[in-house]
Amino acid sequence: MLSLEKVTKIYRTGALGMRKLTAVFEVSFEIGDKEIVALIGESGSGKSTIGKMILRLIPPTSGTIRFEGIDIFLLKGQAVKDYYRKVQGVFQDPFASYNPIFKADRIFTMIREEFFPGISRSQWEHKVEEALRAVGLNPPDVLGKYPHQLSGGQLQRFLIARALLLDIRLLVADEIISMLDASTRVDVLNLLADLRDRGLSILFITHDLSLGHYISDRSIVLYKGRIVEMGPTERVYARPLHPYTEMLMASIPRLDQKWPGQHTRIERTTSYGSSGCVYYSRCPIAQEICARRAPELVEVEAGHHVACLMRS
Amino acid sequence: MGLRVENLRVYYRTLSGYVRALEGATFAVSDGEIMGLAGESGCGKTTLGHSLIYLKPPMTYMEGRVLLDGQEVPIWDMKRMSEFRFRRISLIPQYAMNALNPTRKIGRMIADLLAAHGVDFREILPELKRRLDLVQLSHEVLNMYPIELSGGMRQRVVMVISTLLNPALLIADEITSALDVSTQRAVCEMIVEFRNRGFVRSTIFITHDMSILYQIADTIMVMYAGQLVEKAPTEVILRSPHHPYTRMLIASLPRVGVRHRQERLQGIPGAPPRLLDPLPGCRFRDRCPVAFARCAEVPPFVEIEPGHFVACWQEI
Ligand SMILES: Nc1ncnc2c1ncn2[C@@H]1O[C@H](COP(=O)(O)OP(=O)(O)OP(=O)(O)O)[C@@H](O)[C@H]1O
Ligand SMILES: Nc1ncnc2c1ncn2[C@@H]1O[C@H](COP(=O)(O)OP(=O)(O)OP(=O)(O)O)[C@@H](O)[C@H]1O
Ligand code: SF4
Ligand code: SF4
Ligand SMILES: [Mg+2]
Ligand SMILES: [Mg+2]
């Protein structure tokens, strides 16, 4: 359904845009129908940048993003609108998506004006109520309220309901759980899974590995803008191949097991050479060649890819 | 002897009335204990932490006392508290690593801080360097500006500074929440190491992340909507919690290995009350599946087994 081919994003920063920052480098992956794909990686690894490019909020520096076979950056006019009928995003901080001086349900009215100008009032109300019920909210409890009268979880679900009004095929969910409390985050997660079962695909961006594991079908691990490992979630968690993924998996704080004995390696101040492996400066199994040659992403078992010279 | 808090009540004064953020808290943290303080956003964790060291308006002291090693801590008196702050009770505030003064070099900042507390920087420099070594930071960081360091490095700097004078009590507020898992782990290991080496005697480690507490905390105290609900040794809280809220909270946590397709976790229906005008009695009442008439009164925080405290009428 959605495919990225060698997508790179370089930001220009500093005075006059003289400094270049490669946020995403030659990233390729696909999202299929009815699939939850988790995009995981530490802060600054490029997760949100990928999400924003899929939502056409920023253009890639190079590479192509296709939706149903068509390059999304070549879409014009009505075709752009149609794209947003099918692809929507929900972001981390639910409060930031609302204007505190308007009632929260104004976000629905805006969708009506934009996409459903012809619909009758009663039909529209029916549609909104349906979407709210689909996200586990009771319409009379939440309609007509101001943002401060609703909880973070309720506001987050409002945003998902707004996306559902459009019959979307793909939802980009960028850290939507991290603002929520333990007791409400499970509800939102379960909701995403139900939506998947009803036909929706989801790009689930998170730095929380337990949440990614709970919900996703496939996982993509990013490190400094590169995909270092990608595969079925069960395989990636049970048998990580890349030393970075391995280290992540060993560091997840678990409720059923203490961290294994040895101390964590912490990042050294050295940086990596531009030609070698991005993980070189932190890698416990690095060899001399890794400083000179950048590993390619290689499929080592069905659907399971790794970018490491020693593991492929 | 550690810390003892008795019936501590701290509110926020606002235009619409008092926000009842900490209600009659009574608990103790012993010498060498790392106590995790957990609970959902807005339940009063930061309020409790700050009230032990820095009661800044609109935070308002209502009643209660705090004892450190048997000595009264005058938390209602900003002036007299200055002799406790940093020296004997040290706080790493939420978001501290992002709040370092960007225009000051790290070393300069430490010197200023020490001077404000009457300590000579040069005298303490050798110890400072030893501690930087311990957390694997090069002495170079003293000549660097905060933005030159990664989040994890800044957090380690903050930890070294806050514990430099060997405080009796360290309060660490969400110091791991913005970090990735490997850095989280390194920071947690430091907390334990600092305790083991005696840099810090008792620690209150605030986080909403129970799985982190399982790694490092000796005991866990859970709050809900401004009230203490349960405190027990870590294993007990996680394996056999007694308070209905703690039980539901633990059951809602995704464990690694649990996948949605195999096991569907359950959240807690409803939302926490507003703290301006909460229901009287147990504040979990309108979400509690086993609430009964008695719950309209505030349940006392009672010790049901040695070291295990619960505030629930079902347990009495
Ligand atoms: N508009 C921008 N201009 C310049 N640099 C940017 C911009 N947006 C992001 N970056 C940089 O690009 C890199 C990737 O950022 P991105 O937000 O995609 O990371 P992320 O994985 O989403 O991180 P987080 O977990 O913190 O949200 C970071 O180094 C970031 O500082
Ligand atoms: N300055 C203030 N004025 C009024 N109310 C406040 C103020 N600061 C905090 N509160 C309220 O006091 C309650 C407790 O807040 P506190 O910051 O202690 O929560 P917390 O448990 O630390 O939450 P978090 O996990 O989000 O950090 C909340 O309901 C909050 O809205
Ligand atoms: S290529 Fe070399 S440096 Fe990179 S992850 Fe593999 S072993 Fe480590
Ligand atoms: S005191 Fe009552 S309402 Fe509160 S947790 Fe116990 S049973 Fe539930
Ligand atoms: Mg992001
Ligand atoms: Mg807090």
Image: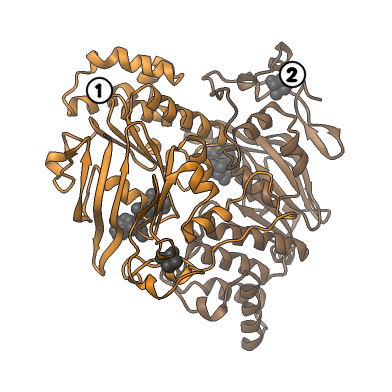
Chain colours: A brown, B orange
Q: Position of residue B25 (x, y in %)?
A: 29, 53
SS of the residue under disc 1: helix
Regarding residue A185, the answer to whether it shows in the image is yes
Question: Is residue B297 toward the left or the right of residue A195 in the image?
Answer: left
Q: Position of residue A105 (x, y in %)?
A: 52, 74
Point 71% across, 13% down: residue? A287
Question: Is residue B226 toward the left or the right of residue A143 in the image?
Answer: left
Tell me which corner region of the image, top left, top right, bottom left or bottom right, holds residue A171.
bottom right
Identify which amino acid the numbered label 2 is placed on: Arg
As measured in the structure, the alpha-carbon distance from the residue carrying label 2 to the one carrying label 1 is 45 Å
Identify which amino acid the numbered label 1 is placed on: Ala
* Above or below for A75 versus B184: below
Regarding residue A180, the answer to whether it shows in the image is no
Mark 2 Cβ and ligand 3 under 8 Å apart: yes
Q: Position of residue B214 (x, y in %)?
A: 51, 40
What residue sits right under mark 2 in the picture? A293
